[in-house]
Image (cartoon, helix red, strand yellow):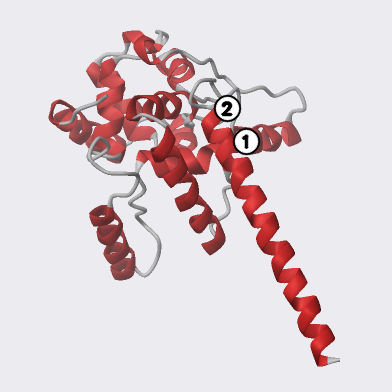
Amino acid sequence: MARLLARLLGRVLLLAAGALVVYQFWLFGHVVYWMWFNPTTTAFMDARLEALRKKNPRAELQHKWVSYDHISVNLKRALVAAEDAKFLDHSGFDWEAIQEAAEKNLRRGKVVAGGSTISQQLAKNLLLSGQRTPWRKIEEAAITVMIETVMSKRRILEIYLNVIEWGDDVFGAEAAARHYFYVGADALTADEAARLAAMVPKPRFYERVGSTPLLEQRASTIFARMDEVQVP
């Protein structure tokens, strides 16, 4: 009986390992595909649209893909300055920022900082749910490695700029620029770009409440740092 149970357990573990390998190849296939083809949606966008349609079945997202060259360099600099100043230097993980975030969270007794890079945020937005679990963090790290292995920094930033959330139903730089400033993403000024970058941690909140002292302070800090960062 014990041997039978051991064999059954072994088979279950083998099947689970096989399924995990197949799943990783499925994820990697998507990442490779996106090297050349633009994602039309993301896991995060799908989840948000589903939530909106529970209230309004006809809800749609504001989203329009624009190429890297048609996005203002001001916004590129602002987002890198705000979210990942070492973007061009790391391979997907900023270990110093992660350590600082962990120490800050430990002092506060709750999660108040993440330390995620742009590549990590992109991995999460493209393919993962919004649930915070140990397994999701492991999967996020694996997808981050895939993204950094096959994509250029320029392509990573291009996709990121086109898929991140900027409001209740607003996704991507073009939709955000038109929603908040009535211009295309290529026409954003440095001030406007800094403000959009400042909204990224809580875009739905800032869309509802508008300007706050904290948002203005964060935008000013980002504006001051923009000339110090490099973008691909």
Residue name at image x 22 percent, y 33 percent: 222
Residue 201 in sight in this render: no
Across and down, in percent, residue 95 comes to: 27, 55
Residue in the foreground of this view, choosing between 183 and 55: 183
Question: Is the C-beta separation of discs 1 and 2 under 8 Å?
Answer: yes
Q: Residues within 10 Å of mark 1 (few under 14, many from 20)?
A: some
Residue in the foreground of this view, choosing between 131 and 19: 19
Residue closest to the far right: 1
Labelled disc at residue 164 = none
- 200 to the left or right of 64: left
Residue name at image x 75 percent, y 36 percent: 54
Quarter occupied by residue 155: top left
The C terminus - image quarter: top left
- 106 to the left or right of 58: left
Residue name at image x 59 percent, y 42 percent: 27
Task: Check disc 2 and report the residue beneath it.
Answer: 169
Q: What amino acid does circle 1 point to?
A: Arg
- 124 to the left or right of 55: left
Residue name at image x 52 percent, y 31 percent: 32
Of helix, strand and loop, which one carries label 1?
helix
Cα–Cα gap, marks 1 and 2: 7 Å
Of helix, strand and loop, which one carries label 2?
loop
Mark 1 or 2 closer to N-term? 1
Residue 6 in sight in this render: yes
Task: Check disc 1 and report the residue beneath it.
Answer: 48
Residue in the foreground of this view, choosing between 156 and 61: 156
The N terminus - image quarter: bottom right
The image shows residue 115, relative to residue 149, as above or below, that is below
Q: Residues within 10 Å of mark 2 (few under 14, many from 20)?
A: some
Q: What amino acid does circle 2 point to?
A: Asp
